[in-house]
Image (cartoon, rainbow, N blue to C red):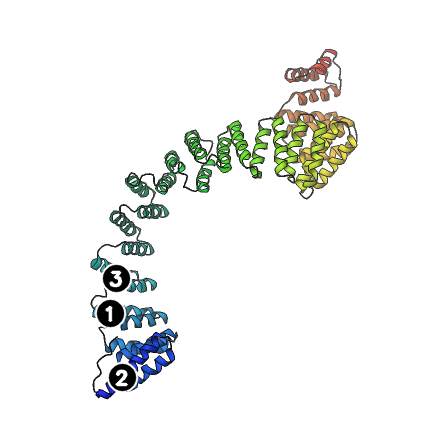
Amino acid sequence: MNIEEVQFLTDEEKAEVDHYFLEGEKYYLLKDFSKAMTAFQKVLDLDPKNAAAHYKVSQIYSENNDMNKALPHAIFAKNYNPKNKYYYLLVTHVQTSLGDLNAAEKTYTEMLTNVPGTENYLFELAAVQLYQKNYNAALESYQKAEDHFGPMEEITIQKQQIYLKMNRLDLAIQEGKQLVDLYPNEPSHALSLAQMMLSNDKYEEAEEFILSKIDHYQNNERLYIFLSEAYSKQKKHVQAIEVLEVPFESTTLDLTRKIRTMAGYLAMLPNEELNEPLLRLSEKLVETHPNSYQALAMTGDLYYNINDRPKGREYYLKAVEIDGSNYNIWQNILSLDLELEDYDAVIKHSEMAIENFPNQATLYYFGGTAYLIKKDYENALKTFNAGKAYAARDANMKSLFHGQLGDAYNSIGDHNKSDEAYEIALNAKPDNDHVLNNYSYFLSLRKKDLDKAYEMSSKLVNDYPENSTYLDTHAWVLYMMGDFEGAAKNLKQALLYEPSATIIEHYGDALFQLGKTDEAIIQWKTARDMAEDTTTLDKKIADKQLYE
């Protein structure tokens, strides 16, 4: 840097100023700021108005982060030589560091007015104005930059962001469209504009814009996803699903995102209008990710939600063939097995699941229940006893396990163990209605602890006054206690809700005990028409006698 011309100095003094200034520059470059400061101070001692020396002193103070001392020297240099842009820039640096953005804004404006060729600092001026939330001034600065340099990506993006901050969405969109037109081969601008429209609920405008550009940006996955979102927000769900086929065919689009997108539609099912488009989408998903258990499981979820249970189970099974470590999928499989009444499958799949999750009580419960339904009581007991240890800390599961154990032991005639299991079940969960019903019913059949049976069955009908099974159980307890009137009353009530051959036969029995033989026979005949095994009923009707 040339030293400013110094007036009123002798030649000897000028030479001395030059010497100390060069010394200062040397030490400054060597980052020996202490010696550099000493040299520049000697310059100022000889020539107090030396702008260059003030500038260098300010630089040293700035390097040492002593901005308060740096500022007056920088301002002096700038004021003494108002055509030197470096002096202005040092002043703005110090002012900004001190947090005086208003002063920095004025200094930038002064420089742009006084120093030709500094238009590129319009960007810094705009940034300072933006930081102060002086949006109109920032827009004006960016407009001046655009007038000088022509349309630029950076300028348009900044103007767009300012308009958004000002809630001028219309002008932000206008800038976005200008950006797309300026850079037609850069899809990121089209994507940003589409996303802006969607984020601000401009769904129709987003749809129109994307459709106008989608052919130009062929097979751009994100653009199709945005179009799908625009359709979906307008409840055009079929179109929303159909346009997803392009991104779903892509192997580069994140699988998790695809699955999350499909999952959003499952809550809308079953829906005849959406079923087929979603099935086609799931086919694309599996074709593109054939070895992904997530893709197969999602397809299983889809079929489940459109009520195609066998197909859903088929895909769940394919999923666990690839990766059996997802417990939820095993649960889905077993639930479907039970729903489809495929008890052999429940047994098989529960055993497979237990290999992966040997400590999950629910899996033993599924398997044991299937054995119980198949009347394979030995394996049912074996399975429930193996799994009950894993249910010990969960009161609900503990009650479920021992309830099933009670049923199984009762079925093989081991009433002591059955009663013991039921007691444990009720201690864990006193309102287990399954146990309350079965325990009280089996006690009544054995005519044992009828007061206890009455207490349990009474609780049931109080809690579930419209449950025909529980009303029948309570009636049978009353029947065994000799309260035939109470039994008939409850059985008549049960018939209002869900008449079955058993309940109707029981009602006939109670009527017979009350001496109403003709009415009893009518009920027995009705029950016979509904029953599978009519042997006992035929005998009752023929002999007009009660056979229990």
Question: Contact, CB < 8 Å: mark 1 with mark 3?
Answer: no
Quickly name the residue at label 2. 17
Secondary structure of the residue carrying numbered label 1? helix
Q: Amino acid at mark 3?
A: Ser
Which one is in front, 24 or 525? 24
Q: Of tags 3 and 2, which is closer to the observer?
A: 2
Real-space Cα separation, disc 1 to disc 3, in angstroms: 14 Å
Secondary structure of the residue carrying numbered label 3? helix
Residue 242 point in image, percent of width and height: 38, 34
Residue lying at 60% horizontally and 26% vertically, measured from the top left: 342
Real-space Cα separation, disc 2 to disc 1, in angstroms: 28 Å
Residue lying at 47% horizontally and 31% vertically, measured from the top left: 270
Question: How many neighbours does mark 2 have within 10 angstroms: few (below 14), some (14-19), or many (20 or more)?
Answer: many
Q: Amino acid at mark 1?
A: Met
Secondary structure of the residue carrying numbered label 2? helix
Quickly name the residue at label 3. 141
- The tag earlier along the polypeptide, 3 or 2, is 2
Residue 124 point in image, percent of width and height: 29, 64
Quickly name the residue at label 1. 111
Which one is in front, 28 or 488? 28
- The tag earlier along the polypeptide, 2 or 1, is 2
Real-space Cα separation, disc 3 to disc 2, in angstroms: 41 Å
Q: Is residue 72 visible?
A: no
Q: Is residue 116 visible?
A: yes
